[in-house]
Image (cartoon, rainbow, N blue to C red):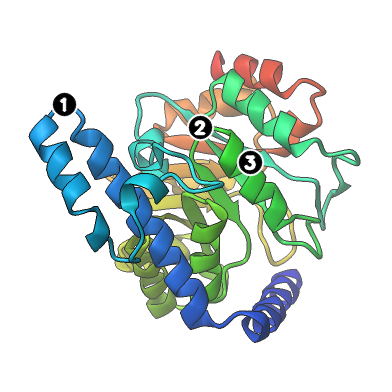
Amino acid sequence: MILDTLAAAAKARVAKLEKQKSLVTVRAEAEQVYHRETYYYKYTASADSGADRNRMEMDAGTAPDGTDPVKDAVCAGQKSAKLTKRFQENLQRPGLNFICECKKASPSKGLISPEFPYLEIAKSYERGGAAAISVLTEPEYFLGSDVYLREIAAQVSLPVLRKDFTVSPYQIYEAKVLGADAVLLICAILSASQLEEYRLTAESVGLDALVETHDGWEIETALKSGAKIIGINNRNLKDFTVDIGACLQLRKEIPEDSVCIAESGIQGANDIRALKERNFNGVLIGETLMRSGNPEEMLGRLKEA
């Protein structure tokens, strides 16, 4: 099956990475990034209180990573106000929120954007009013790259989702180091215990987790695992067939207090209106925008539907 192939490729990739850098090391790097972000957020939040700010400056040498937090909190490639622009929070805003995807290719559609000016695409999404950006990093079948994620995360103010086939905590920590704000967890390739473990791992370093489902059983599993953001993928990852009716039918299975996202196969205004009628919080859309020739303009039209 296609999904088995993708998951196996992800496991092989992680195994290779772990030979170059251990899980312990990448976890420490992720925790260091998170500590710096947290300190910077607290420091800037205290700007209106001189006493509090002075106290934090005096305590600067006690940062968890042993560095000077005031000087180092805003480190290269990290967004200075990341903690105030969380992925989940943006998706909970009123109306239908758009997660716009930067995707060069896919197994089902082949090459989507030969030149792939990923930074300009991401910035056009930002100008067009996206709530977040999804970046494919799977290299073999989607021609994604960690470089795309790192550079987009550094140059846009929107939260960024690392979209990949997550099969190890290693990838979650790696996502944090690269600058992501959220990771994708796919029910079809993870056990119930892994879903919970990986979500908690993500949250431990300040990442949100989008838990992807395709049927009622997977939705039930996601809810039991404590998922806060649940995506319904209209694409069956076992054969890559697409049916937008999947998310429309399954929406009722997800409680209103959960963030519900429609994924894949969204092509035009009629689809957007159908999602709005069923009170989806958001939609993940990529190919329609990528093939439009003008992603910013296309996004604007869809938002007005």
Q: What's the residue at 56%, 46% (across, down)?
A: 77
Residue 11 is left or right of residue 116, and the answer is left
- On residue 174, the disc is none
Q: Are marks 1 and 3 in contact (CB under 8 Å)?
A: no
Q: Earlier in the sequence, mark 1 or mark 2?
A: 1
Per the image, label 2 sits on a secondary structure element best described as loop
* Marks 1 and 3, how far apart at CA: 31 Å
Could you tell me the amino acid type at mark 1? Asp
Q: Is residue 60 above or below residue 42?
A: below
Residue density around tag 2, few if under 14, some if 14–19, many if 20 or more, within 10 Å: some
Could you tell me the amino acid type at mark 2? Ser
- Image quarter for residue 251? top left
The residue pinned by badge 2 equals: 157
Q: Earlier in the sequence, mark 3 or mark 2?
A: 3
Per the image, label 1 sits on a secondary structure element best described as loop
* Marks 1 and 2, how far apart at CA: 23 Å
Could you tell me the amino acid type at mark 3? Ile
Q: What's the residue at 41%, 41% (across, down)?
A: 82
Per the image, label 3 sits on a secondary structure element best described as helix
Q: Nearer the viewer, residue 160 or 30?
A: 30
Q: Quadrant of the N terminus?
A: bottom right
The residue pinned by badge 3 equals: 152
The residue pinned by badge 1 equals: 48
